[in-house]
Amino acid sequence: MPARTSAIPTLAFMSIADTAAPALATPLTKDDLLNDYRLAWESRHASLAGRKEVFMGKAKFGIFGDGKEVPQLAMARAFQNGDFRAGYYRDQTFMVAIGQLTWQQYFAQLYANPDVEAEPATGGRAMNGHFATRLLDDDGNFLPQTNTKNSSADISPTAGQMPRLLGMAYASKLYRQNPALQPFTEFSVNGNEVAFGTIGNASTSEGMFFEALNAAGVLQVPMLMSVWDDHYGISVPAEYQTTKQSISEILMGLQREGEGQPGFEIFVVKGWDYAGLVDTYQKAAAVCRAQHVPVLIHVTELTQPQGHSTSGSHERYKSKDRLSWEEAHDCLHKLREWLLSEGHASEGELDAIEKDAAAAIKTARTAAWSAFFDPIKAERDEAVALLDKLLFDTGTENKLHELVDQLKSNPTPIRADIVRTMRRVLRHVRTEKRSAGRRAVQRHLEQLLAENADRYNSFLYSQSEQAIGNIEEVKPRYAADAPVVDAREVLQACFDANFQRDPSIFAIGEDVGKIGDVNQAFAGLQDKFGELRVTDTGIRECTIVGQGIGAALRGLRPITEIQYLDYLLYAVQILSDDLACLQYRTKGGQKAPLIVRTRGHRLEGIWHSGSPMGMILHSLRGMHVCVPRDMTQAAGFYNTLLRSDEPALVIECLNGYRLKERIPANVGEFTLPLGQPEILLEGSDITVVTYGSMCRIVLDAARQLAEVGISVEVIDVQTLLPFDTQHVIADSLRKTSRVVFADEDVPGGATAFMLQQVLDEQEAYRFLDSQPRCLAAQPHRPAYSSDGDYFSKPNAEDVFDTVYELMSEVNPERFPDIY
């Protein structure tokens, strides 16, 4: 194994622009230059102070942007109103430079202040360095995006910003090239908006980075990607991260051959060269904005003066030579040298700016701590007063005073300390006579729990007027001569009607365009609506979804197709880490109403008949999960979702497209409410709860069971998230007192989820006279062939035997053992 070195690789590949210019090509005044110097030093002092706050115990963790200040200032000068950012946790200088972050807000996030007025990016829900602008008003409606500078909400997983970045750039292409979108002036001005991305050099090793860059080159979208290269990924140097230790070298094949040709423009510039950086970003943004050419800017020779984060020191893994080199090439020191050598400032002016910068950060830090901690102290004092009265009323001062005194004397209490103490005190006085003091403590505890639920548990789903629950149900209407057609034609008619109704709707995915998807639900729609609205993509599930997320953030209504449910695994990480938690992690500040369309359950073989619902339910909370049994139900869900502002996954039945269904007369208007099961067959002896393709199998079994005298009530849950909001299943169990949960997932998957929802959440265990049963598939992928399907997944005979066995336990004489 080669020894680790700390040398800076020499870049053989040259940028298309000469970024080593000795002076600025873009005219800046002395005030501009000195303001940048001030801001750079404010950012450095913020990083230094942030690290100290963590070590003092005032924050739990810190990750900072020191060493990256100068290139971020240059990027900010190219960033215009309407532009979007998708970056990572080093971008504090940039966010302040574009006017979307104050230093007090920066420290508020470090302290996890849950007040969105103090910490508007995440309301204290994300650790520091996770930036976002609030794209929604207080009612959950989009604010105008073209008169402000915008940042999508950051996530921690490295390169996770890339799929969303692609989508935000793609939105500009649609806004420019689709004339029907010209009236959407609050979201775009002729598609002139650039999507700026940032990433660390080590994270370019992630597959999402390469996938997104390739897609951007294919699509030719205005995506400007900056790589902050400090030669390390935590402790691991570039020789273990990147071929040739240079991301720009290995991507040189993306460089376009000339204007009007497909590909990228690639620039390489040193991260301490202020003049070269400003010129590079101006040139790069100009070509990106005007020509919709994607751009990669590789910013080299950066440093990280405090190491990766507060988790450890970089002295553990960097050599003395490397540390000396970093000190000499610190971008702030280099900026000072350049300002002096070019005669832009004197030593005294720069010294004064550095001193003032330190003072400004101290003021912001002090104000942020006071804004965070003073309300907590007030809450603590109010709780202590109530507890003291309770102890006096109940005569338990001697027994409980130590518990209350610990809270009273704690110099830095948190809200959990307050609630924990109140709960423990109430536990201790549970046998005492109820008093006014006790009731006051109980009421105050309830108030605190409600307030903290809003602080930490709200906005998993939309709370706007367009939330799913607010969409009015419209029943399907059928003409007397309603045509009976292949089920896929119902979906085709639904999509056709919605595309005519709303020009912001578009669909993308593998084989969606020219052939109308592999099951023909989009057949003919590309010819009718054009390639911009019904679009083929490459095989790249992760960025298909990301393309939708970014476009939805910018006011469009994408439907992104994953060809088979089995392939959703490629996209689950970004759906979970980015889309599902978006409203939550911004506390209602951003939304992306993306519909992910796919097809699953039984068909053929290991990778074309999956039903991994447990994985989906556990990883995608924050999205709705629809599991329609047929294409008419699916159409109703699409109509509902396209009128809502929430993200959802719709899983159609793979084996249902050629079954016959009637087309509703209002196929584009009828809506199906989410969270409301449907009773498909009424019965009195036992309830079977299922969904999707299993509905037909369970109904078949129910007819066979009726022949032997067993009356089965069959319920289709229709959606798993939300799940039975009206407690339809509990009402059924009140009648039948027995239940089987059946599906095609592995044991312990969605059947276990349904059981928990009904018996625990709905408290339907009270109505049971027999053990609840779960009927699932085998604990392996389904085998190929009809026999493989029969012996891998539940069939009508399995359902029959499971139900019959339960009834045999109840009445063995009437239902003697079969086997």
Image (spheres, helix red, strand yellow):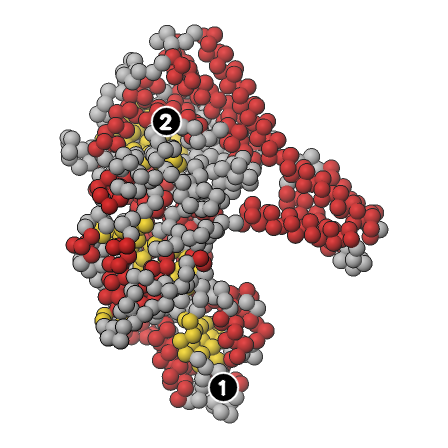
Q: Which mark is residue 619?
A: none
Label 2 element class: helix
Q: From this viewpoint, which residue is outermost toward the bottom?
A: 813
Q: Nearer the viewer, residue 624 or 814?
A: 624
Q: The N terminus appears in which quarter of the rendering?
A: top left
Quadrant hosting residue 527: bottom left
Q: Position of residue 201 (x, y in %)?
A: 35, 33
Kindly report the distance in space between the C-alpha atoms of the residues bearing marks 2 and 1.
74 Å
Residue named by callout 1: 808
Position of residue 761 in the picture relative to residue 513 (left or right)? right
Marks 2 and 1 close (CB-CB < 8 Å): no
Residue at position x 50%, y 67% in the image: 726
Amino acid type at circle 2 is Ala
Mark 2 Cα-neighbour bin, 10 Å: few <14, some 14–19, many ≥20: many
Foreground mark, 2 or 1, reads 2
Looking at the image, can residue 718 be seen?
yes
Does label 2 or label 1 sit earlier along the sequence? 2
Mark 1 Cα-neighbour bin, 10 Å: few <14, some 14–19, many ≥20: some
Amino acid type at circle 1 is Ser
Position of residue 526 in the picture relative to residue 304 (left or right)? left
Q: Nearer the viewer, residue 399 or 462?
A: 462
Residue at position x 23%, y 70% in the image: 486
Residue named by callout 2: 76
